[in-house]
Image: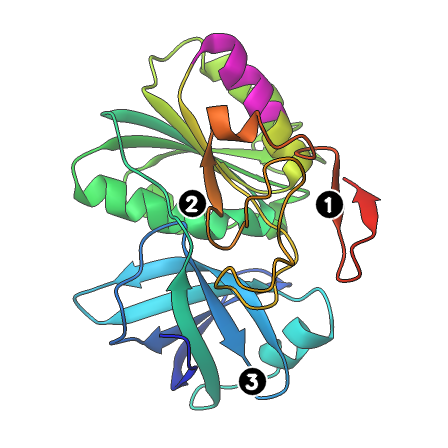
Amino acid sequence: MHAPKVVEIKRIIEETDTIKTFIFNWDGEPAKPGQFMMLWNFHDEKPMSISLIDPIKEEIGISIKNIGPFTEAIHSLQVGDKLGLRGPYGRGFEITGSKILAVGGGVGMAPISAFVNEARDRGVDVDVISAATTKNELLFMDELRAADVKTYACTDDGSFGFCGFATEFMEEIIKEKDYDMVVTCGPEIMMKGVFEIVDKLKIPAQFSMERYMKCGIGICGQCCVDDTGWRICAEGPVFWTDEVRLITEFGKYKRDASGIKHDI
């Protein structure tokens, strides 16, 4: 499990101008929505959320946004090229209740997509809010709507769907529907807003957090958060509302590779 498994890229889906989904055959340990893989390009290794889990075809997918040298190198690869994968790691989402609202921002829609697929397979009704800065960056809208998932789009610039933030739209619909639970992944400032809404309304919620990771298995301590000392790679990346309340840095700051704080 902790040694990378070298796999071939089976398919590549160009989701947006900046995001591609890489599909691999995977016969390793089964993955759960909300977990992550450590992706190795034979030079460096980074954690990546799982966006597709297909146990029948024995496939997993990882959706990657091109934001720096590592992801740029991954984006340059073609079908048939090889990468190293190890995992899956971390605590994923739990599926509880019969009516769930899933809120995803940007590439944070990756684990949300995997969650929605599994929840629907279990007969759970899920509504989705997919948010992005602009229309061309919205993820999985066509796939979700083709699967008859009630999906709302939010764009910062108003180019598609609701003009504004996901949390603004969430406040409008969450009082109209009786949701048993909320799950969310995206920019932490967005999830902070989700936290404030669900905390006020006393709706159970799960949050997929991100911090700088090196080992992915809870040894190096690089992804520990202040006060609790929880390791995002081990105790997380998914946390419930009552746990998030104890993470005092949530929505405020995070640390880089050298441990220096940066405001969110």
Residue 104 x, y percent position in the rendering: 51, 40
Question: Could you tell me the amino acid type at mark 1?
Answer: Lys
Badge 2 or badge 3: first in the primary sequence: 3
Which one is in front, 259 or 112? 259
Taking the image as shown, residue 163 lies to the left or right of residue 12, namely right
Residue at 35% in and 60% down: 52
Specify start and end residues of the magenta stretch as a single range. 193-202
Residue 146 x, y percent position in the rendering: 31, 46
Question: Could you tell me the amino acid type at mark 3?
Answer: Leu
Q: Disc 1 and disc 3: Cα gap in Å?
A: 31 Å
Q: Are marks 1 and 2 in contact (CB under 8 Å)?
A: no
Residue at 56% in and 32% down: 161
Q: Quadrant of the C terminus?
A: top right
Q: Quadrant of the N terminus?
A: bottom left
Which numbered tag is attached to residue 77?
A: 3
Residue 235 x, y percent position in the rendering: 46, 46
Badge 1 or badge 2: first in the primary sequence: 2
Taking the image as shown, residue 178 lies to the left or right of residue 43, namely left
Which numbered tag is attached to residue 254?
A: 1
Residue at 65% in and 35% down: 227
Question: Looking at the rendering, which quadrant does residue 29 occupy?
Answer: bottom left
Taking the image as shown, residue 117 lies to the left or right of residue 255, namely left
Q: Is residue 114 above or below residue 171?
A: below
Which numbered tag is attached to residue 112?
A: 2
| 1 or 3: mark nearer the eye | 1
Which one is in front, 236 or 132? 236
Badge 1 or badge 3: first in the primary sequence: 3
Q: Disc 2 and disc 3: Cα gap in Å?
A: 25 Å
Question: Could you tell me the amino acid type at mark 2?
Answer: Ile
Residue at 44% in and 86% down: 79
